Amino acid sequence: LSRLAQSGKTLIYSIHQPRSNIFQTFDLITLLTDSGQMAYFGPAKKSMDFVQAGCGLKVEPYVNPADYLLDLVCTTPADGDD
């Protein structure tokens, strides 16, 4: 896939919760909420910086970025919250 992308082809694919070593190979990612709203679009390597600096959230060391980002966009309101 990498060779195809480097040859100028556009590749679009959906991978749900990849391992961290697979996530690190992505150039750009689009992260959507469960309602389809765009939560993040940009370089995969800068996504965790965005979470920390742009959103003010603390990210623990050695966390799988894909798991962490998915948890952020798929959280449900606590019981009683609207």
Image (cartoon, helix red, strand yellow):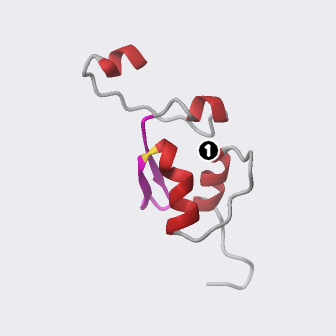
Residue appearing at x 68%, y 65% in the figure: 58
77 lies left or right of 37: right
Specify the quadrant of the image occupied by residue 1.
Answer: top left
52 lies left or right of 81: left
Secondary structure found at label 1: helix
Instruction: Residue 34: tell me if it is visible.
Output: no
The residue at which mark 1 appears reads as: 66
How far across and how far down the image is residue 43, in percent? 43, 44
Would you say residue 38 sits in the magenta stretch? yes
How far across and how far down the image is residue 23, in percent? 57, 35
Q: From what the image shows, is residue 48 above or below residue 11?
A: below
How far across and how far down the image is residue 73, in percent? 57, 60
18 lies left or right of 78: left
Residue type pointed to by label 1:
Ala
Q: Looking at the magenta stretch, what is its main secondary structure? A: strand
Residue appearing at x 74%, y 50% in the figure: 61
How far across and how far down the image is residue 52, in percent? 58, 63
Q: Nearer the viewer, residue 70 or 7?
A: 7
Residue appearing at x 67%, y 84% in the figure: 81
Specify the quadrant of the image occupied by residue 38.
Answer: bottom left
Q: Nearer the viewer, residue 64 or 13?
A: 64
Instruction: Residue 59: tell me if it is visible.
Output: yes
Would you say residue 5 sits in the magenta stretch? no
Magenta residues (range)? 27-42
Task: Specify the quadrant that holds the C terminus.
Answer: bottom right
Q: In the displayed orientation, state which residue is furthest to the left.
A: 8
35 lies left or right of 12: right
Mark 1 surroundings within 10 Å by alpha-carbon count, few (fewer than 14), some (14 through 19), many (20 or more): many
Residue appearing at x 66%, y 75% in the figure: 77
